[in-house]
Amino acid sequence: MKKNILLLLSLIVAFQFSTAQTDSLQWLDLELTNYKYPYEVSTLKLDIQEQSLNMAYMDVKPENYSGKNIVLFHGKNFNGAYWKTTIEALTQEGFRVIVPDQIGFGKSSKPQHFHYTFQQLAKNTKTLLDTLDIEKTAILAHSMGGMLATRFALMYPKVTEKLILENPIGLEDWKLKVPYQPVEWWYTNELKKTAKGIKSYQLENYYDNNWKPEYDQWVNLLAGWTLNSDYKTIAWNAALTYDMIFTQPVVYEFKNITAPTLLIIGTRDRTALGKGLVSYDVKKTMGLYNQLGKSTQQKIPNSQLIELEDVGHLPHIETFDRFIKPLVNFLKA
């Protein structure tokens, strides 16, 4: 009898925790129309791959506009909203800041079928810049955005004035160590995601088990989608972009970048795709940003490296002041 009562009490506590967790989340629609970005959002219609898609973006032009532009590329688990403090700082310095949500992310369209390539996403971004009559710009990119920015800089060297890569992924070719998994495998994994799991991943991999309340919003922007009955659409697009990242390395082409480049690297970062699919010994060799920053700087001509000790995957969130100073100095040099 006592055992049954204890079991019942534990179930009630678990249910209350689960309910409280769900109640704290904001249900999000597929294009985040019920989530407010820090600046006004516009959309560009793209007729590509035999469908009409919308690319959302923020275009923030300061009163003291210097004539200089910068485009911010988000990472895979994020969207343009997390650049808020960076946008504020750069506009104060006179830069016009353009922040797109790539197709499949944030407030942009989530297609049912799409052939994701970094070339296609780069071309979409170039179309946006053409629409805004921007001929030259600096590019700042984080995480997956670093792979996209590298491709953009290679495709459009005359447009790319300067390139800044903040803890980019793709500094190593994971295909050499991780067994290939089909899109369906990534899709199944995405369908299993929960708010608790997303927070646990970020806590361990982004913040070294040091959580701050302001990090909750970045969990909610992903977890809020899991409450949507159409979450499978989000999951499918996420699976397709995982496949893009895994199968389209840029590491072999760093030597061809011509733009002056700055690497801002949090050396505590250990991000690597597919670490859960390899042995412990192999896992230990992956995502070593304290080494990858140095080796990548040697590969990219005319590049500089700023290493941020004891900083993880998100310098512009975790330690903004240490991130923004070298960025502005580089842009103004």
Image (cartoon, rainbow, N blue to C red):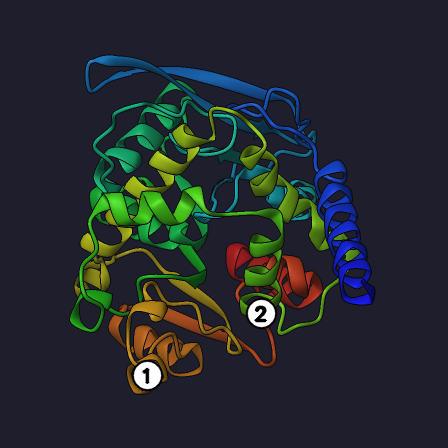
Above or below, 230 against 67 in this view is above
Tell me which label, 1 or 2, sits earlier in the chain. Answer: 2
Pick the front one: 193 or 60: 193
Q: Position of residue 190 (x, y in %)?
A: 41, 45
Left or right: 248 in relation to 92 = left
Q: Amino acid at mark 1?
A: Thr
Q: Of helix, strand and loop, which one carries label 1?
A: loop
Q: Identify the residue position indicated by label 2 in the image.
A: 204
Please indicate, yes or no, whether residue 235 appears anywhere in the rendered image: yes
Q: Position of residue 227 (x, y in %)?
A: 59, 32
Q: Position of residue 140 (x, y in %)?
A: 46, 50
Picture quadrant where residue 117 is located: top left
Q: In whole angstroms, how far apart are the C-alphas of marks 1 and 2?
A: 18 Å
Q: Amino acid at mark 2?
A: Glu
Q: Identify the residue position indicated by label 1 in the image.
A: 285
Residue extending furthest toward the bottom: 281
Q: Which residue lies at the image location 38% right of the left edge and 54% below the top edge?
A: 146
